[in-house]
Image (cartoon, rainbow, N blue to C red):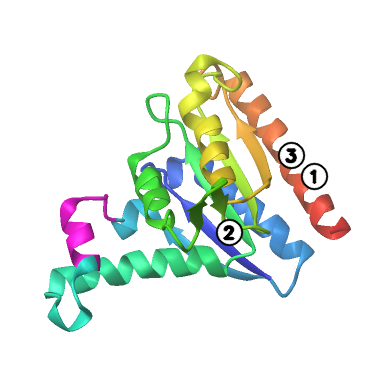
Amino acid sequence: MKLLHIDSSILGDASASRQLTREVVATLRAADAGLQVTYRDLSADVTSHLSGATFAAKGTPAEQRNLAQKLEVELSEAILNEFMASDVIVVGAPMYNFTVPTQLKSWIDQIFVAGVTFRYSETGPEGLAKGKRVIIVSTSGGKHAGGATGVGHEDYLKVAFGFLGITDIEIVRADGLNYSPEAKQAAFTAARASIGNLASASVAA
């Protein structure tokens, strides 16, 4: 089984989401000794945002691309290939200003490719990335899940992955992290309980 581990926090070792994604991956690895893990740090890999230049690069024949275009296309293709090859995707998704980090949004833009991860037909859109399991590690300083301020965070990610045909989407949540030291500890305790349940689900599967 192949697992893709995505981190998007800009906070390095101080990041709650990074700490918890590591624990998720370690737990799943313990349950499956043969697990193959690919790691991508979106804050370090400088994933390109969509632009006219990006589309121009992809639309230029390979032999005519300049160096910048070649590098941009290679990174875009690598991101897409990693996603498509993975059975499980663990996504670190901290909340920044009521939504996901721009680095994570850019990564999502790279995996939305018509004819590869989704398509339109006479009956409407169809996701082509079926059969994958997505585990979203959601962190936030406040409590937003289920409310209007959470729509651009967890809800957005569920819609995005669901559009690609993924129905197995799980949330490991640590919220209210900035309320107090006690609230932060309680949030981590709850998140780790969720991680323990992920391991049980993996063994059952």
Label 1 amino acid?
A: Asn
Q: Per the image, is 67 magenta? A: no
- Left of 57 or right of it: where is 42? right
Residue at the (58%, 68%) spot, across then down? 37
Principal secondary structure, stretch drawn in magenta: helix
Residue 197 marker: 1
**Disc nearest the viewer among 2 and 3:** 2
C-alpha span from label 3 to label 1: 5 Å
Nearer to the camera, 106 or 43: 106
> Would you call the spot at circle 3 few (<14 residues within 10 Å), some (14-19), or many (20 or more)?
some
Badge 2 or badge 1: first in the primary sequence: 2
Q: Name the image quarter holding residue 195.
A: top right
Residue denoted by label 3: 194
- Magenta segment: 48-58
189 shown above or below 164:
above
Residue 164 visible to the viewer: no
Nearer to the camera, 37 or 106: 106
Check if mark 3's residue and mark 1's residue have beta carbons within 8 Å. Answer: yes
Residue 129 marker: 2
Q: Name the image quarter holding residue 158.
A: top right
Residue at the (57%, 46%) spot, across then down? 123
